[in-house]
Each structure stands twice: as structure tokens, then as C-alpha cells.
Image (cartoon, rainbow, N blue to C red):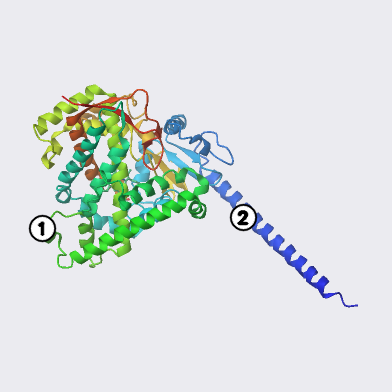
């Protein structure tokens, strides 16, 4: 007898369901085996590097509590397990974290690509610019961009930076009567103002006009992306973009991308007749976009529109957040060590006299102030950590090695506070940077701007801006601490204080 049609369908349906379940289970099993193998490979790769106890699921991720002690914990691991130790973020992501200059030298002399966990998050934000590029493309861009940091190009920026600092000081003046002021937002707006003027001559007025959609988008985008790398579920683009934070991030990215594209389009139009930097310089100062638009390699090849946008956005990001962090912590150090503050002020006044602006020639006449800036960058490095993914095995000076594909980070903060390298590392002592003392040190003991072929291309720009901000600020104000609100250092892409940096300001005599 023929089975009823109904029963044939349900038998086939059951089979289909069964097959589906077997397929899903096999995929899960295969993925499980793959992950198990991956973990075994990672453990084997790092077996010669002992490290702190690690939870099988979370690794050390729970140790990053944003409680002001994260960097201290990394330092103490570095002291317990010298040179380098593994740090696990979950069961499948591990960094060999370097805490000694000798190991840093080996890593930073190579050109391994940036690691794909932290740096890939930059791409939707700043595009594939110099910071994230690798290989031949990076080399080509680095060569094209280097002329943008020639001192001839940097010179006119001094006036722009000086003007931006004066606007910041006027805003601070209005608040100076307050018990104390969190200086971070003021400094952040000032460095954003300055980088926009230097990068593409854009007068954003962002220090007074808080409604500018472009500058708001840049600030919003940076704060939304910050900390994403420390929260492993957000490593997935899908999860991040589904979150409210991710959606705001996409909106801010769109606004800022459109703005940069417009600026590039208009500039291309206005530079139709002037393709030589010298010709532009006859009429006005060169900004960074001019340099990019005039840049060509030996085959006459320039940058595409997308590459131009990525480089401009990279400079806006790298050029404002890092210097803002640097300047804010320098102000904190000056407030904490009034004797050094006073010495800097005396030096600054001897150089400036009655002037309230800084000029190019002044910058080399401030040796003590420069040493204080360097000492502050040692104790509070704006970029506390960097990372690479090995494109071939790496062997360190003591013979230990890790294979291709491994992630290796350099904790700049730990190297800067390593007692094997620095005497009394926690003491603020600017004289460490006197020429005599500097010449005695390991070449990779001091790395605020990293070192080697991928060092910071903007370090002269940044040092100039920091000197100008410190000179004009100490010429105007006496800075002191607010003991009721000490800053809490937090490890992010850029070093920040969780609760701001609250200082008391008094007109200086
Ligand atoms: C105090 C301020 C600054 C500090 C501490 C700093 C620090 C650093 C560090 C540590 C790196 C290496 C990052 C890595 O290897 O992943 C770097 C790279 C870079 N910095 Fe800076 N930076 C500062 C300011 C600037 C400024 C003002 C600009 C541009 C105007 C800039 C542009 C760049 C670029 C484009 C790179 C990537 C270079 C490459 O990979 O070839 N930085 N910076």
C-alpha cells in the first residue's frame, strides 16, 4: 500500500532536519578542533616566555580594569618576567609584550606589519594611511610624505600653533577663578584647531564654535573608537556596528569623510595651475594637503583620492590626540613639580621678553623646558603601547624566538619605567635628558615616538607644538595641583586620565 503524501513529506522533512543538524554539529566540531589547535600552537609558540597566571577563557583581560593601575600591572609583570611576557586577551589572542629596550631594538629595526587586532579598527576611521599601511605601499607613502615634515614646511606652523595656544589661554583665563579646571578638553580643542590649520588650512574655530559638525564628528569618532580594542566582543565589526556606539561611529565617520573629500576636491581645483610647492610658497604657506597633492614618485605617480583622504585623516587623528595627551600630562608634571615649573618660566621669559608669541628661532633656545617635556613624555608616554604581527620568525638577543604570525607588542610605558634601565624611574628628573646623560643610555630606552623605520613621522611637529604650548602657558599662568582630584591614568590608544586632569590656574607674576 502507498504511504500517504503527508507522511512522505514529514519523513523527508525529518531527514532534512537531521542532515542539517549533523552538518551544523560537524561545523561546530571542526571549528572547535581548529580553535583547540590554534590555542595549542599559540601556547607552543610562546613556551619559552613565562608569564603571569592566565585564566583559560579570559586570559589577563580582566586585569585591564581601567582603575589607574593597568600600566603598573604591566610593569610589574615585566619585572617578574624580564624582557617579555605573554598577555592573553581571551583564549586565542595573545601578545608577547616587550618591556626591555634590547628586545624593542630587535623588533623595531624590522618592518613587520601592524597587528590586525588593534590597528584594523583604525581603518574605518582613518582609512589606509601611513599608520596602518604595510610593505611596499607603506614605503612608497613614507617617501612621498617625508618632505611634508621638512623644517621649511614646519616653520610657518609655529605662528599658527602660537595663535591657537593664545585662543586656549583666553578661554582658560575666563575660567581661571574656578577652584580647579579640567584642562584636557581645552588642550584637545587647541591641538585640533592647530592640526586643521596645518593639515589643510581649515579655520574651524572649534575652540569657540562648539557647533561645527565636522570638528564634532572628529572628536566623537575618536572617543567612540577608544577602548574598543580592550573589549573583545567589539573586535568583531558586526557586533560593534550593531551597538549604539558603533552606529554613532559610522555616522561620525561619514560626516568627516565627506568633509575631507570636499576639501580635497576644492584644493585640487584651486591648485590646477600651481603644481610646484615653490610656486605655492610664493603666495602662501604650504599646508600638508599641498605637499600631498604635489607628491609624486619617480614614475610621476601621485596619490589617489582615497589615499589622499586616508593620509589627511591619519594626520588629523595622529596629530591632535597624541599631542593633546602629551601637553596635558606636561602641564600636570609642571603643576606637580613647581621648582621645575619655575625654572622653565625663568628660561621662557628670558627668551620671549615682552613678546606673547613664540617664533621659530625661540624653539632651540629652551633647553631646560625641552628636558622637562622629554621627562614628562617618559613618565606619561602619549602612545603607551604599540604592536606588530610577525611576517617572519623573530629571534631576540638571548636566543629566544617566536614564529611567523605571532603578535608582539612593545609596552613603551614599562620600558620608560624599567629600573634596569633608569635609576629611580619614578622620580621626575629632567637632567636625565642632558646631552651627557642621554649619550650613556641604551638607544631604545626612550621611545615616546617609537624608533626605527616606522618611527613617528610627526615628532618634530609634535615637539614644536608642545614647546609652544608650554612656553605660552607658563608665561601666562602658574599651575598647581588640585589635591582633591588626582588624575587616574587609563590605558587607551592614547594615554588619558579617566577623570580628567584638574589644575588650579593663577595669573603668573
Ligand atoms: C606627542 C605627540 C606624538 C607622539 C607621542 C607620537 C607617537 C607615535 C608613535 C609611538 C608612533 C609609532 C606607532 C606604531 O608603531 O604603531 C607614531 C607613528 C606615527 N605618527 Fe606620531 N606621535 C605624535 C604626534 C604625531 C603628529 C603630530 C603626527 C602628524 C602630524 C604624527 C603622525 C604619525 C604617523 C603618520 C605615524 C605612522 C608612521 C609610520 O608608520 O610610518 N604623530 N607616532
Q: What is the quadrant of the N terminus in the image?
A: bottom right
Residue 408 appears left or right of 314: right
Asked whether residue 106 appears in the rendered view, the answer is yes
* Badge 1 element: helix
Q: Residue at x 73, y 67 (%)?
A: 16
Which of the pair 497/460 is nearer the observer?
A: 497
| Residue 38 drawn at (x, y percent) | 56, 50
Which of the pair 407/278 is nearer the observer?
A: 278
Residue, disc 2: 31
Q: Residue furthest bottom?
A: 2
Q: CA distance from mark 1 to mark 2?
A: 63 Å
Asked whether residue 448 appears in the rendered view, the answer is no
* Badge 2 element: helix
Q: Which mark is residue 314?
A: none
Residue, disc 1: 283
- What is the tally of numbered marks visible in this picture? 2
| Residue 369 drawn at (x, y percent) | 20, 31
Residue 342 appears left or right of 227: left
Amino acid at each position: 500500500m502507498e504511504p500517504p503524501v503527508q507522511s512522505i513529506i514529514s519523513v523527508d522533512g525529518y531527514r532534512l532536519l537531521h542532515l542539517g543538524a549533523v552538518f551544523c554539529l560537524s561545523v561546530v566540531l571542526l571549528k572547535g578542533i581548529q580553535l583547540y589547535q590554534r590555542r595549542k600552537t599559540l601556547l607552543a609558540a610562546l613556551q619559552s616566555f613565562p608569564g603571569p597566571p592566565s585564566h583559560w577563557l579570559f586570559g589577563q583581560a580582566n586585569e585591564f580594569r581601567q582603575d589607574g593601575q593597568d600600566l603598573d600591572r604591566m610593569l610589574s609583570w615585566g619585572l617578574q618576567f624580564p624582557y617579555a611576557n605573554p598577555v592573553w586577551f581571551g583564549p586565542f589572542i595573545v601578545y608577547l609584550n616587550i618591556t626591555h629596550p634590547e628586545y624593542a631594538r630587535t623588533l623595531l629595526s624590522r618592518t613587520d606589519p601592524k597587528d590586525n587586532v588593534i590597528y584594523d579598527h583604525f581603518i574605518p576611521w582613518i582609512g589606509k594611511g601611513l599608520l596602518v599601511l604595510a610593505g611596499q605601499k607603506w614605503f612608497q607613502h613614507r617617501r612621498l610624505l617625508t618632505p611634508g615634515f621638512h623644517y621649511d614646511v614646519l616653520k610657518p606652523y609655529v605662528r599658527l600653533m602660537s595663535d591657537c595656544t593664545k585662543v586656549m589661554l583666553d578661554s582658560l583665563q575666563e575660567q581661571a577663578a574656578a577652584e580647579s579646571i579640567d584642562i584636557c578638553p581645552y588642550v584637545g580643542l587647541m591641538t585640533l584647531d592647530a592640526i586643521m590649520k596645518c593639515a589643510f588650512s581649515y579655520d574651524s574655530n572649534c575652540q569657540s564654535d562648539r557647533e561645527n559638525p565636522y570638528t564634532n564628528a572628529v572628536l566623537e569618532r575618536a572617543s567612540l573608537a577608544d577602548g574598543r580594542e580592550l573589549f573583545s566582543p567589539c573586535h568583531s565589526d558586526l557586533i560593534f556596528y550593531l551597538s549604539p556606539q558603533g552606529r554613532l561611529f559610522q555616522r561620525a565617520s561619514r560626516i568627516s569623510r565627506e568633509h575631507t573629500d570636499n576639501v580635497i576636491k576644492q584644493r585640487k581645483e584651486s591648485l590646477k595651475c600651481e603644481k610646484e610647492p615653490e610656486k605655492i610658497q610664493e603666495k602662501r604657506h604650504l599646508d600638508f594637503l599641498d605637499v600631498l597633492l604635489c607628491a609624486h614618485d619617480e614614475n610621476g605617480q601621485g596619490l589617489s583620492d582615497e589615499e589622499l583622504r586616508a593620509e589627511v585623516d591619519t594626520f588629523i587623528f595622529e596629530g591632535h590626540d597624541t599631542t593633546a595627551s602629551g601637553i596635558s600630562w606636561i602641564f600636570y608634571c609642571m603643576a606637580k613639580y613647581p621648582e621645575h615649573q619655575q625654572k622653565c618660566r625663568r628660561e621662557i621669559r628670558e627668551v620671549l621678553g615682552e613678546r606673547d608669541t613664540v617664533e621659530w628661532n625661540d624653539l632651540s633656545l629652551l633647553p631646560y623646558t625641552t628636558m622637562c617635556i622629554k621627562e614628562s613624555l617618559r613618565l606619561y608616554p602619549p602612545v603607551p603601547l604599540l604592536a606588530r604581527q610577525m611576517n617572519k620568525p623573530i629571534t631576540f638577543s638571548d636566543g629566544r624566538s617566536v614564529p611567523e604570525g605571532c603578535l608582539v607588542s612593545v609596552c613603551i610605558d614599562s620600558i620608560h619605567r624599567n629600573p634596569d634601565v633608569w635609576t629611580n624611574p619614578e622620580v621626575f628628573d629632567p637632567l636625565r635628558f642632558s646631552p651627557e646623560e642621554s649619550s650613556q643610555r641604551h638607544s631604545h630606552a626612550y621611545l615616546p615616538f617609537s624608533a626605527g623605520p616606522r618611527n613617528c613621522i610627526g615628532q618634530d611637529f609634535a615637539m614644536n607644538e608642545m614647546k609652544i604650548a608650554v612656553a605660552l602657558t607658563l608665561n601666562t599662568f602658574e599651575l598647581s595641583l588640585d589635591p582633591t582630584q588626582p588624575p587616574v591614568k587609563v590605558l587607551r590608544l592614547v594615554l588619558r586620565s579617566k577623570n580628567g586632569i584638574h589644575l588650579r590656574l593663577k595669573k603668573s607674576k
